[in-house]
Amino acid sequence: METVVSGIRPTGNLHLGNYFGAVKSFLQMQNEYNCYFFIADWHSLTTSPKPENIIKSAHTILAEYLACGIDPEKATIYIQSDVKEVLELYLYLNMNAYLGEMERCTTFKEKARKQPDNVNAGLLTYPTLMAADILIHKGVKVPVGKDQEQNMEMARKFARRFNMIYGKEFFPEPASFSLAAQAVKIPGLDGSGKMGKSEGNCIYLMDDAETIRKKVMKAVTDSGPTEPNSPKPEAIQNLFTFLDIVSTKDTYSYFDEKWNDCSIRYGDLKKQIAADIVAFNAPIRERITEYSSNTDLLNKIAKRGAEKAHESANKTIREIREIIGFRS
């Protein structure tokens, strides 16, 4: 069975974009692949989180993963910092990574532009840590968005370079597993093309009913259609995308007809979307609350996941040490 590896930084709650993007794909993959899903708390250190927030944030993401249906009996779910072998591989990869190629990474240049007072070595070597996360399990498929494709190419480069230096076909070259075919792109409520934390246009899985209603009622619209059957502007199409994913087909058809005959009332449309998102979100939110309140269970699941991940990672490190020439 092929190995899939994927991680998420614990920088806040999951939102609908995360759910209909990565998480729904994870739910399918856990039944078809040998999956390692981890919470990337080491990666989060590039933004200098407060110590008290590190464990809390990791528990938040873990609770939300479980509430969404990721099953620790099917997939290995663990916290990155619990698997110390990743750091050893990170060191070995860094020894054969070159300053020029790291500085040319688009993600590094973008982060350096956004946070010029905190251009740290962790940002520079982000691709090697990401590669270590993947290669420690000899992952062959990695679910990523387009923004991570350059880092995936770096991971393949590091795998090839290690194999070439030591004359061993040890690491497979991990392939990007595109989520585009399965994932639904969830638009932002501000009329933009994508829901994202940094854009501040999210509906979170933990949002209560009143918060969801307020957010949806503030969604960007226009003055309405002036001609029958006219194309929908982006902001309006975004609202219909929400209808498509959380409402019934009859509901979608009803408002589509109202658009096409120019009788649509945006207030009614938004109220319907809000009610349907609340109905969709409610059972997930309830499960998140249950998991979040059971710290002992979260710790138990994280510990079991770490043990399974450690078994895989330790095997890889033992083999690497032998290849390089260190004592096992």
Image (cartoon, rainbow, N blue to C red):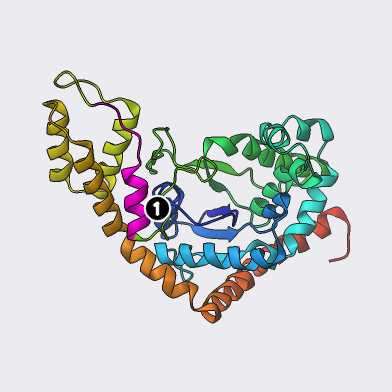
Q: What residue is disc 1 on? A: 24
Q: Position of residue 143 (x, y in %)?
A: 51, 46
Residue at x 31% of width, y 52% of height: 213
Q: Position of residue 312 (x, y in %)?
A: 65, 65
Residue at x 85% of width, y 45% of height: 95
Considering depth in this image, is 280 or 317 the residue closer to the camera? 280
Considering depth in this image, is 195 or 123 the residue closer to the camera? 195
Left or right position of 40 against 104: left
Q: Position of residue 117 (x, y in %)?
A: 78, 40
Considering depth in this image, is 109 or 257 the residue closer to the camera? 257
Considering depth in this image, is 248 or 69 the residue closer to the camera? 248
Residue farthest top in this picture: 227
| Residue 17 vertical placement versus 87 (above, below) | above
Per the rendered image, the range of residues in magenta is 209-223
Amino acid type for the residue under numbered disc 1: Lys
Left or right position of 267 against 124: left
Q: For residue 185: magenta?
A: no
Kindly indicate the quadrant of the structure image that contains residue 239. top left
